[in-house]
Image (spheres, rainbow, N blue to C red):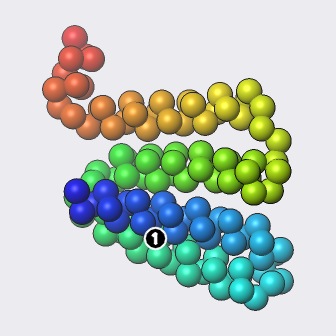
Amino acid sequence: MKGYAFLSISIIGEIFATSMLKMSEGFTVLFPSVGVIIGYALSFYCLSLCLKTIPLSLAYAIWSGVGTALTALIGVLVWGELFNMLKLSGIILIIGGVVLLNLSDKPETAKELSN
């Protein structure tokens, strides 16, 4: 359970850093630029800690998938980026992929699917 707590913090740090990246305007604005560095440092540190208990393939899939989906939603809600069925479909596919990777780590599920 501790691994998933670190993974959650890592995802939050990554989303924060990516949002600050947009606000930094190419690292020309100081405070968002510092936020990028702090957010990514926190994200990768916590990601490394979660890897003590969560397999790399699963942790990275969750980290990148959830981070991408939530960043897309923040883009729509905060910066008014376009939201259409194609973007929604992509988010759904990302979530589906994370679910499948999660299921594949359970030996009983993998055995059932292979029969």
Residue 79 position within the rendered picture, expressed as x and y whole percent measured from the top left = 80, 56
Q: Eyeballing the image, is 57 above or below 87?
A: below
Residue 22 position within the rendered picture, expressed as x and y whole percent measured from the top left = 76, 67
On screen, residue 57 versus residue 39, left or right, reads left
Among the 4 quarters of the image, the one containing residue 114: top left
Q: Eyeballing the image, is 52 above or below 89?
A: below
Residue 51 is at least partly visible in this image: no
Residue 51 position within the rendered picture, expressed as x and y whole percent measured from the top left = 30, 61
At x 65% / y 85%, what residue is drawn? 34
On screen, residue 101 versus residue 115, left or right, reads right
Residue 69 position within the rendered picture, expressed as x and y whole percent measured from the top left = 59, 45
- Quarter containing the N terminus: bottom left
At x 63% / y 80%, what residue is drawn? 35
Residue linked to disc 1: 44
Given the current orientation, which residue lies at the most extreme bottom position?
Answer: 30
- Quarter containing the C terminus: top left
Residue 99 is at least partly visible in this image: yes
Among the 4 quarters of the image, the one containing residue 47: bottom left
Under mark 1, the amino acid is: Phe
Among the 4 quarters of the image, the one containing residue 91: top right
